[in-house]
Amino acid sequence: MPKSRGRKLKKRVAAGPPGNPNKMVFGKLDFGIENRHEEFKRAFLESAREDVEKYPSLLDQLFGLLKECMPESVVSTFAFYGTRAAINAKGEARALTKGIEQHHIELLQGIALTLPAADWGKAPSTAEVMQTMFDIVPQIANTIFKRRLIAEADEVDDSQKALMALQEKIRLHTQAVRNWGYFSDVKLICRELYASLDAKLEAVAGYTFSDILDVSETVLTMIEQRGNNYMDALKRVLSARDSATMVEGYFREFPDLVGTPAELLDMIPKGTPREGIIGLLMSHADLRHLNDMSVTTAEIAATTGKEEERIDRILGMLSIAPGELANHKVEHMFLSNPVWARPGINLGGGYMFVMPQAIFSHINEIMWNVATSAKIESELSDRRAIYLEDKAESVIQAALPTALITKNAKWMVGAQQFETDIIAVVDKTVFLVEAKSHRLTPQGLRGAPERLKRHLNDVVVAPSLQSERLAGHIVAARAGDVESLKITNSLGLNAELVDQIIRISLTLDDLSVLSSSEEELAKAGVIPDGHNLAPAVHIADLCCIADIVDQEIPFLHYFSERYHFQKHFEVFGDELDFLGVYLSTGFNLGAERKDFHRLMVSGMSSVIDRYYNARDVGIELKKPAPTIHRSYKEIIDKLARTKPEGWTTMGIFILNSASPEEQRKVERGLNRLKRSVTRKNAKPGHGCFMEVVPPLNRKATVGFYVHQGVNANLRRAHMEHFAAEALERGDVASCLLFAKNTDDWSSPYEAVLLVQQRERVVPELKS
């Protein structure tokens, strides 16, 4: 039969289509070292050694300033400018000070708490002192990191070197990344996780886990509101047109000031420019941060309605007194800072929380320490396991409403029993989930690399091996293996119908950095040879993915292709950065992008961050969504609505076939076919077919057949012919065809045909 094919669509990634908020633009980083890596390494280490030599003097300078100026004033002002950010109507956050991160503030606070109260300075902080702090604290943090790089540079064993590099990556992630979820999600997860143990904790400690959360939220709200009020007042002051009006406004906005505007104006040298007046007022106003960031037991009790004794116990548990860290080495604060689990400062008459949000950054470690002190850590460990499984089930059921879900499915291999936490079956797709609530302990972070290796095996590798074990039996059962058939039958699985097997491991600790560390895991010998590692996804990230990718086919497609994206590229980024890449490209980057084997996708989550950050402050933005062209979106919507046999496989195949930019080309090609088949002299079966051949053989060929209504009787024969031709080429195992009727062009498709070579189609062990 004569045929006319459209040109094969070559895979190409460029900037997103006009108006695409998720657009991804590639750029190549050129460090100018090319093949001079060893030379670069030597130069870097030499520079690091020079910085390390300056470390003692930097530390002495820092301690000198803390002994001269009030540490509580220095730390509170440092934290205010380091953490304060304005969120505009677009959900975009703009920091007041660049280069200051939360871990810098924690380091400064930890260092200050090594000094006993008697050594704390008495003078107020000045702008000059604060600028020095902004300069040297990041230098000290970087130098501590460089000291370890120098110590590890002489390691010669590749496996040990990879393990040490992996440990360093996790340490850096733990040090610099503080938010394991968006605030509303963090609060919800904490309430759900800990509330059931309230009675056990109260019997021992005199307060509950819910009390800790109530008090922490109140402290955060109170201090943030004070900060907002301060910023609003200062903004009104500084908007004045002249110096006299500015000073008058300063006294009006802050009525507790002593003196009069006239007296202050008399103290200011004549001729001082407006910028000088602004600097003076801001420096003076900065002295307020100490009080604005401090709370008393009575204040929190009045707001929460809880008794003061209960409040005082909680605030005391969350705080450290001056000098309490006298025996703690500054160098160890990079790996295990006591401030993480106790972010408050006990000032005697009150408690100062310069970063109240840090309570929630480290809430799981805080709660574990509380449970350990109350000797109920075993109960909490059990609760973590139960909660993670229950939460995973509810999220997956919401994301896949048509799925048949089995939880805690037990199956036998000979005399040995195994258990799979969650099996979700949707059409011909099996979704396997292993939920592991193990903790990554501080000892594992700062201790010997072999200890970290054991940790990673428990949290990451063991659950992946478990899900792969069942996936292997499903594949074997599909091929007719008798023993494997017994297993799948006992689980109610019809292995004959399975096309896709998707696997993930869920955690309660943030190990998102491991999503981009598979190469290091393999080199370090953590992953057994030949094993396909399932990614470790934090439960908060799964909640976010399910919320953003809120339709069944795209949700399955995300996790189906997520595995290949991680395998093909060495990626720098976390799970939500991966999600940002998916929203932009559908993971359709193309096999020819070998020049981008290493991808830095950190920051791709920005569109997601803006949405949730805005939501948390009461600003409603349009929810981000995968970038799918209208014609493709209509196809997957109809597949999900009508659910023909194999609809999930078809949906994954169609989304695999083209990037968002290429989907636009497909639509233009369809319109050309429509014009071709509706010509007066058009012959049935001529100029009516277009195929999209993705560059990766593992992906199915997708074809589009266009016909007039009068030729509907020829549709099946033509579609089967085109499918047979595609499969005959030998490089394709599956072919998916859609038929469109020119007389009903608004319909996404009139018929769909999925043809597969039985002997070549093996369910992929995807993660």
Image: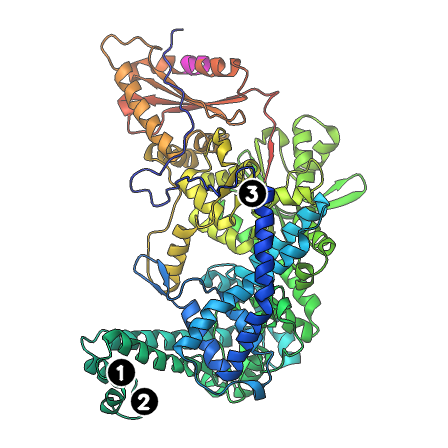
Residues 603 and 362: in front is: 603
Read off the magenta span: 716-721
Residues 255 and 197: in front is: 255
Secondary structure that dominates the magenta span: helix
Residue 111 higher or lower than 587, as above or below = below
The residue type indicated by label 2 comes to Leu
Closer mark to the observer between disc 1 and disc 3: 1
Identify the residue at image location x=57%, y=50%: 43
State which tag comes first along the sequence, 2 or 3.
2
Residue 716 higher or lower than 409, as above or below = above
The residue type indicated by label 3 comes to Leu
Identify the residue at image location x=56%, y=52%: 512
- Residue located beneath label 1 in the image: 250
Residues 389 and 164: in front is: 164
Q: Label 2's element? A: loop
Q: Name the spot of residue 684 as percent of width and height, x first.
A: 33, 10
The image's mark for residue 257 is: 2
